[in-house]
Image: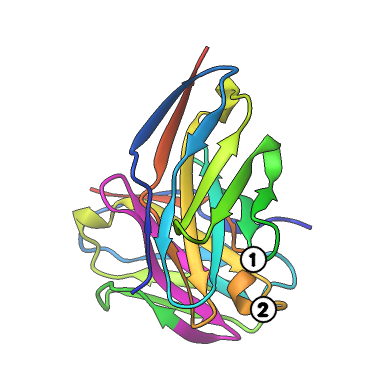
Amino acid sequence: KAGVTQTPRYLIKTRGQQVTLSCSPISGHRSVSWYQQTPGQGLQFLFEYFSETQRNKGNFPGRFSGRQFSNSRSEMNVSTLELGDSALYLCASSPLTGGTGSDTQYFGPGTRLTVL
Amino acid sequence: AQSVAQPEDQVNVAEGNPLTVKCTYSVSGNPYLFWYVQYPNRGLQFLLKYITGDNLVKGSYGFEAEFNKSQTSFHLKKPSALVSDSALYFCAVRSDSNYQLIWGAGTKLIIKP
């Protein structure tokens, strides 16, 4: 099976612009989670989608939004970009089979966003 | 509240020596524990997880982890370190009552030749 894919891999934007990142999960996986990774803050949970519904949301401002399509592909959008939004954005998919507690997340390579 | 602690920001080990990367957790109910590795400019790769049963879990690349309920720990180990094991390691925990994975801050592992 192909792994989780994220596009684009690298992105440079300027303050005030908006950006859309895309994630295609592993075939058959229904849950998609998004994370922001920065050197100072580590791995921060953004949100999680399952069957086109947002199930969990982290502590990020409303400028960060996401959605999931019927084929489980997901997008996240960041509006009015700030310098502090520069980070590696990671997407992870999981199958949600069996006990949900034991569900394993599989990560994509990430999108490196630089805000100038 | 659920939490994960990785008490060491960095661990230095000589090649060929055993390595341990520490992780302690706090969770209500039964824990599900995970280890991931991240190489530079890459996403996280799943190494192993503890669900239930045997306290010693074996994973990818010769890594294993020991679950200790009384000490609420899940330390990652490898008998003989390789230079290629140098990377950033993350511990994470989840419980049945909350699907969200809680992540540690990460430990940078440096293996010196």
Identified at 63% across, 24% down, the residue is B80
The residue that label 1 is drawn on is B51
In this view, the residue in front, B29 or B13, is: B29
Identified at 60% across, 22% down, the residue is B82
Q: Is residue B96 visible to us here?
A: yes
Q: CA distance from mark 1 to mark 2?
A: 10 Å
Segment tinted magenta in the rendering: A33-55
User: Is residue B112 positioned above or below A49 on the image?
Assistant: above
- Outermost residue, front side: B70
Q: Nearer the viewer, mark 1 or mark 2?
A: 1
Q: Chain of mark 2?
A: A
Where residue B21 sits in the image (x, y, percent)?
A: 47, 39
The majority secondary structure of the magenta stretch comes to strand
Amino acid type, mark 1: Ile
User: Which of the labelled discs sits on residue A99, or is there none?
Assistant: 2
- Outermost residue, top side: B113
Q: Are marks 1 and 2 in contact (CB under 8 Å)?
A: yes
